[in-house]
Amino acid sequence: MKKIEPFKTPHDAIAILDNGGRFYNILTTANDGIISKAELGKVGGIFNDQQQMILFLELSLAQLDKTQKAEVISKLDENLKETYLKYKPKELLPSQVESSGIKAANTIVTGIPKLTESKNDFNGFIMIPIMTGSVTTFTMIPIMDRYDVYEIRDQDSDITFLIAHIKGAEKLPEKKIKIAGVLKELKEDKNQNTTDKLFLEVVYHIDL
């Protein structure tokens, strides 16, 4: 989970993103008016995770208005535009995610996170893969064994939604922030037949 400082103007965004990529990206050129995956990945410190690249891009443009954002998006090369359309995050209120969110999709929510510190206050399980030789099996573990778990709520609603990030990352501030991540499955108990709920695995956030 990483805090992003969003771009203030489209000029700043284009100037930083159109950077020529890393030294071994010999097919990209800085300041040519075209932004490639290699160039976006360099700014975000991302190598091959295309879904994460688009999360980074979307949140880094979050403070631009619609016209300004469109100006930056127009500079993406065709390959990156296709990736952007494929993984473009859906922005939802915390109260909307359970009904409108899609598992494994990039999602952005805004609200005030409150850390759940006690396992006695919350039960929930996630499925994780385990490799045994060349065989992959899955097991259920409590979500709080792997993640710091928060409730995030709308300002105008008492409805909350669960967000989480891997333990060891800096704690989220208890103030209004915008959070970008990927929706994942959550079960209320270890019974495989229970209906899956969702939680948001946080990748990036910005202050508001």
Image (cartoon, rainbow, N blue to C red):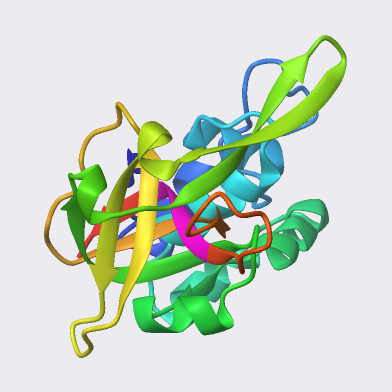
Which residue is farthest top? 133
The answer to whether 85 appears left or right of 110 in the picture is: right
| Residue 187 belongs to magenta span | no
The answer to whether 69 appears left or right of 78 in the picture is: left
Task: Say if 38 sits above or below 14 in the image.
Answer: above
Q: Which quarter of the rendered picture does the N terminus lie within?
A: top left
Task: Say if 203 sits above or below 177 in the image.
Answer: above
| Magenta span | 198-204
| Residue 173 showing in the rendered view | yes
Residue placed most toward the observer, 119 or 167: 119
Residue placed most toward the observer, 43 or 122: 122
Which is the main secondary structure of the residues drawn in magenta?
A: strand
Q: Which quarter of the rendered picture does the C terminus lie within?
A: bottom left
The answer to whether 47 appears left or right of 124 in the picture is: right
Instruction: Give x and y (percent) for residue 84.
Output: 68, 61
Task: Say if 151 sits above or below 70 in the image.
Answer: above
Q: Please give the name of the residue rendered at 66% of the width and 38% of the height, measured from the top-left corner.
A: 49
Residue placed most toward the observer, 177 or 200: 200
Q: How many marks?
A: 0
The answer to whether 202 appears left or right of 110 in the picture is: right
Instruction: Give x and y (percent) for residue 144.
Output: 35, 40
Residue placed most toward the observer, 193 or 169: 193
Q: Quadrant of residue 166?
A: top left
Q: Please give the name of the residue rendered at 50% of the width and 77% of the height, measured from the top-left corner.
A: 98
Which residue is farthest right? 134
Q: Please give the name of the residue rendered at 55% of the width and 71% of the height, measured from the top-left corner.
A: 71
Instruction: Give x and y (percent) for residue 73.
Output: 61, 65
Q: Quadrant of residue 203?
A: top left
Q: Quadrant of residue 92?
A: bottom left
Instruction: Give x and y (percent) for residue 131.
Output: 74, 18
